[in-house]
Image: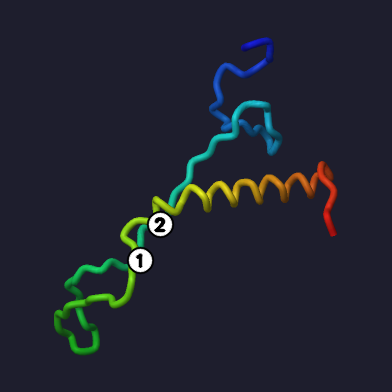
Amino acid sequence: RKGKIVTKTNNSGGILGGISNGMPITMRVAFKPASSIAKKQSTVDIKAKKSAILQVQGRHDPCVVPRAPPVVDSLVALTIADHALLAGQIKPVL
């Protein structure tokens, strides 16, 4: 393509055996759901052996998606820089 040798597909995400193959580096990211929500929930009080209502107090975000891209970008850049340091491709500052 455009005078460059490229693979037919990028099913490997741009990395083969820990080495970049020149294709764009792609990845899938997953986040666990929020552990608490600001909605009353039915539960069971094990000690009293009765049904109860649980309501978590404080500020809780129902969705972390708006803050996810900068965190993922930063961690990917940090990981790539860490591996470049380990491989001796860039010199340590200290």
Up/down of 49 relative to 28, above or below = below
In which image quadrant can residue 10 be found?
top right
x, y percent for residue 41: 19, 71
Tag 1: residue type? Ser
| Image quadrant in which the N terminus is located | top right
In which image quadrant can residue 24 be found?
top right
What residue is shown at x 40% (from left), y 57% (from top)?
Answer: 32
Tag 2: residue type? Lys
- Horizontal side of residue 41 vs 90, given as left or right: left
Up/down of 50 relative to 37, above or below = below
- The numbered mark at residue 8 is none
Q: Residues within 10 Å of mark 1 (few under 14, many from 20)?
A: few
What residue is shown at x 39% (from left), y 56% (from top)?
Answer: 64
Q: How crowded is mark 2: few (under 14 residues within 10 Å), some or many (20 or more)?
A: few
- The numbered mark at residue 32 is 2
x, y percent for residue 14: 61, 31
x, y percent for residue 4: 68, 14
Residue furthest bottom in the image = 48
Are dots 1 and 2 in contact, CB under 8 Å? yes
| Image quadrant in which the C terminus is located | bottom right
Element on which disc 1 rests? loop
Residue at numbered disc 1: 35
Residue toward you, 25 or 92: 92
* C-alpha gap between disc 1 and disc 2: 8 Å
- Horizontal side of residue 77 vs 50, given as left or right: right
Up/down of 16 relative to 39, above or below = above
Residue toward you, 31 or 90: 90
- Please count the marks in the image: 2
